[in-house]
Image (cartoon, rainbow, N blue to C red):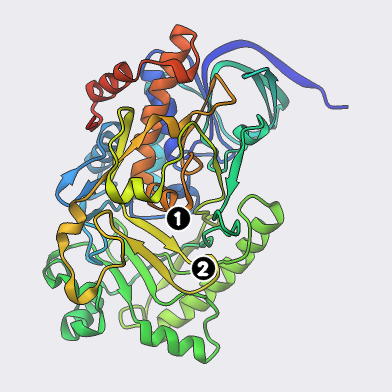
Amino acid sequence: MFQYLETEEMYDVVVLGGGMSGVFSAIAAGRNGAKTLIIDQNGYFGGTLTANGVGPMMTFFAGDKQVITGLGEEMVERLVARNYSPGHVLDSTNYISYVTPFSAEGLKIILDEMVNEANVDTLFHSYLIDVEKNDSQISSIFIANKDGLSQIKSKVFIDATGDGDLAVMSDVPFQLGRESDNAMQPMTMNLKVYNVDTEKLRNIVLEDPKKFPRLNRDLAVMKNTEILSFIGFDDEFKKAKSEGRINIPREDILFFETNVPGEFILNTSRIINESGVSALGLTKAEMIGRKQCEELFEFLTTSIPGFEQAKVAYTGPSVGVRGTRQIKGMYTLTNDDVLENKHFKSTIAHSGYPIDIHNPKGEGTLSVHSSNSEEIDHEQFDKSIFNNYYRIPYEIMVTNEMSNLIVTGRCVSASFEAQAAIRTTPTMTALGQAAGTAAAMSAKKQIDVKSIDIDVLQETLISQGSFIEK
């Protein structure tokens, strides 16, 4: 029989998950006066950006208009001030307007500092294992770590686990993957390499731009940007697959230079038919992902100009998950809401990132920007599509079943297509700031999270730097 340690301390807000949405929930709650605890299974904050090797951040902008500001922008400014990031730079793949490269190690430090400055308590290396409920209220959670089992009490809980773990334990209904067949977007093991000849890569494109239709949309960016984003070499990739050298079910290679010249993150592996909410599925995905990265590196060094002398920095560290469960909240954000920029009275965040669906079953990536209902035509490309952005309402983070639970991050209440748009890390900073601010308001007044004054929430977010259009 397990014994557990019951803490006497009562928190105002407890955040489960230290990814980008969770950490900014905790910072926002702490800055708004709530006694806050954040719990994460890793030994650092940042989620996909630090634990899964994702980079750059995509995107804080819609065209030239910055639509994600607040705490997320403060983080970027701190990174820039410490030479951990060049800030927002033009995207030379011409997929969006701006990307934000960064140092993963620097990000860990900056997030530590922001959490500590907000007087937030932290428990790393800790896992949620159970929940205690009283009707529609979570009274406590149980976590496991090196101390054994502990019971933690709070007025309000925020589920930022990415998979809706706390919500599911609390019997909140959810949708797993795509509505038609429960298929989930592929997982990816990122590969970081260094000692790449960036100028050689750039010149390959400038010498034969028609070979690179995405990059050829605006060659001025390719010529002038100091930090390179790249997609292409489709023919070489296809040939390697036909020869059995590559077994990645994807159509091209995608890679992004970090804040370090000649260092690139390759977002190219594609792990299909495995589940991000299964221990066995995640285990298989880790192994498949590493094998795909080994094949990819051999292909790069033998077939792609500029990579001849490249070296592997690392894979992962862990496999990246794009989506699993979506909770069923008071409102479900839809594909049409994103494409048509539906107006909500309860808007708490915006995003300019398009619908971006990696085929759950193999090759193919569907990208739809907010102004279109079809994929971009390379021959008739118009950068004005980057100017579109959409609104995200508060109701996708709260549930009908629970009175003191807010859900944030990629597991919010959204359709498969809408989640494919809002899942990226800059958007997560905005959702997290809104969730933490709302949780602090609920705890202070001891009211249902569904009963907070939305106008006050919006004005508070605006006063603390967020971009909100009502």
Q: Position of residue 73 (x, y in %)?
A: 26, 37
The foreground one among 206 and 438 is 438
Labels 2 and 1 touching (C-beta < 8 A): no
Q: Which mark is residue 53?
A: 1
Secondary structure state at the residue bearing disc 1: loop
Of badges 2 and 1, nearer the viewer stands: 2
Q: Amino acid at mark 2?
A: Arg
Q: Quadrant of the C terminus?
A: top left
Residue that numbered label 2 is attached to: 270
Q: Position of residue 288 (x, y in %)?
A: 61, 68
Q: Quadrant of residue 207?
A: bottom left
Q: Quadrant of the N terminus?
A: top right
Left or right of residue 338: residue 227: left
Q: CA distance from mark 2 to mark 1?
A: 15 Å
**125 to 465, vertically: above or below:** below
Circle 2 Cα neighbour tier, 10 Å, few/some/many (<14 / 14–19 / ≥20):
many
Residue at x 27% of width, y 51% of height:
100
Residue at x 42% of width, y 83% of height:
237
The foreground one among 149 and 337 is 337
Left or right of residue 267: residue 74: left
Q: Which mark is residue 362?
A: none
**178 to 208, vertically: above or below:** above
Q: Position of residue 58 (x, y in %)?
A: 31, 52
Q: Amino acid at mark 1?
A: Gly
